[in-house]
Image (tube, rainbow, N blue to C red):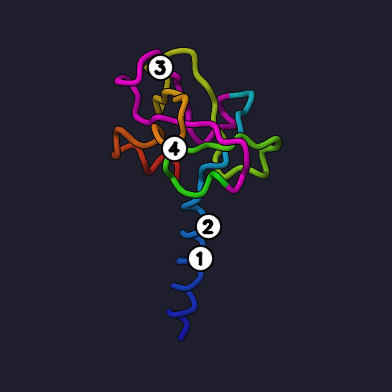
Amino acid sequence: MKNVFLYSILFFLFISNSRAQKVFSVEYQNQADVKVFVVQYENQADLNAYKVKYTNQARQNDGKWFFTDYANQANKKIFFVNYQNQADLKIFFVKYENQAGWKNKSKQQLMY
């Protein structure tokens, strides 16, 4: 019975963390969960990101990001680095929602 309860808790924690597309841009690198570099060209990116206007549009780990006003509202805190070699994740901001998505699936776990 204890195992069922434990697995239930772990499952709900995983589900709540799998919606990690609410992000907050921190001021200092040591506050960040993920260091991000914005690339100049789409073919250099690990993720094509699209900024959504409303929090309910940022549902899954699919590249649709909602930038929160406060750090405690976000699932992930990110820091934008100045150089590509400092980054955990390289992103390219796309103009249209349907262009959002992962190009390098091995980096997808960074946003869970």
Q: Quadrant of residue 110?
A: top left
Disc 3 + disc 1, Cβ < 8 Å: no
Disc 3 + disc 4, Cβ < 8 Å: no
Q: Residues within 10 Å of mark 1 (few under 14, many from 20)?
A: few
Between the residue at mark 4 and the residue at mark 1, the CA separation in whole angstroms equals 22 Å
Foreground: disc 4 or disc 2: 4
Q: Residues within 10 Å of mark 2 (few under 14, many from 20)?
A: few
Q: Which mark is residue 104?
A: none
Between the residue at mark 2 and the residue at mark 1, the CA separation in whole angstroms equals 6 Å
Q: Earlier in the sequence, mark 3 or mark 1?
A: 1
Q: Is residue 70 left or right of residue 79?
A: right
**Could you tell me which residue is drawn at 37 percent across and 36 percent down?**
101
As for residue 33 lying within the magenta part, the answer is yes
Q: Earlier in the sequence, mark 3 or mark 4?
A: 3
Q: Secondary structure at mark 1?
A: helix
Q: Secondary structure at mark 2?
A: helix
**Could you tell me which residue is drawn at 53 percent across and 57 percent down?**
16
Instruction: Identify residue for label 1.
Output: 12
Instruction: Identify residue for label 4.
Output: 63
Q: Which mark is residue 39?
A: 3
The magenta stretch is 29-56
Query: Whole-percent x and y of residue 31?
Result: 59, 32
Q: Quadrant of residue 109?
A: top left
Disc 4 + disc 2, Cβ < 8 Å: no
Instruction: Identify residue for label 2.
Output: 16
